[in-house]
Amino acid sequence: GRQARGAAEAARPDRTRGQGRVAGASRQGRHDRDPAVGQGGRQRAGLGRPAQDQHSHAASLRARAAGLALGVLVDAAVGDPRRGHPVAGFGRWAGALERRLWADDRTRGIAFAGAALLPVLAGGVALERVTGRRTLARVLVTAAATWAVLGARTLAAEGRAMARHLEDADLPAARGRLPHLCGRTPDGLDEPELARATVESLAENASDAVVASLFWALYGTTSTPRRRSAR
């Protein structure tokens, strides 16, 4: 009787092994059907971008970094032009719109802000689309945008000029120079007050025109002009 039962058990199919083979075949089928898995250096499903997208993203970051560095170097070497500066041009445009559109009213204020920023926003989107994956074009556009908003060389020159006037105890010249940095009325300010106003203005302008501009440049080729215009 025991021999008969043993023979019957040996003849019975192994369900565990069969289920394992079915599961393995199912996994292999999913592996073959899924284009994100397996052969040719493809990535595992759901783990990051495809290799081509990663390469494009890395190239875009390199172009942005090179454009930022080039823009900083151009600003350090050339500085701001005396005429035709883009920021000054935007200021004239916004001033003309303000005289025509602005009023102490929420709707008209929104209309003024939107009309003033529209050319900058549209121009930024157009430039990013035109440059696309053209590395050299993106580097040059990023460099031009960075140079236009930085103004670090001019800011440092104004600070050195004010320091010379204060060291020479030339208060009239220092008072005449202060409006280049801030909107305070310099009449009647003594030497410590002039020095304090200069340091505060240099710190504020460096934060706004240099540090913030470089930070926002991380978010796109033309992010800095859009931020500076809105600011």
Image (cartoon, grey):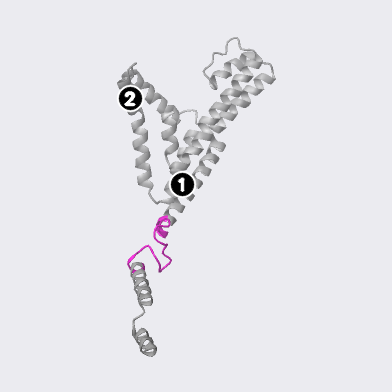
The location of residue 129, given as percent across then percent down, is 35, 45
Left or right: 76 as drawn, with respect to 59: right
Kindly identify which residue carries mark 1: 139
Question: From mark 1 to mark 2, how far is it between C-alphas?
Answer: 34 Å
**Above-or-below relation of 117 to 185:** below
Which quadrant of the structure image shows residue 96?
Answer: top left
Q: Residue furthest top?
A: 188
Which quadrant of the structure image shows residue 85?
Answer: top left
**Above-or-below relation of 20 to 91:** below
Q: Residue furthest right?
A: 168
Disc 1 vs disc 2: Cβ atoms closer than 8 Å? no
* Magenta-drawn segment: 31-53
Secondary structure state at the residue bearing disc 1: helix
The location of residue 227, given as percent across then percent down, is 43, 33
Q: What secondary structure prevails in the magenta region?
A: loop
Residue 84 can be seen in this image = no
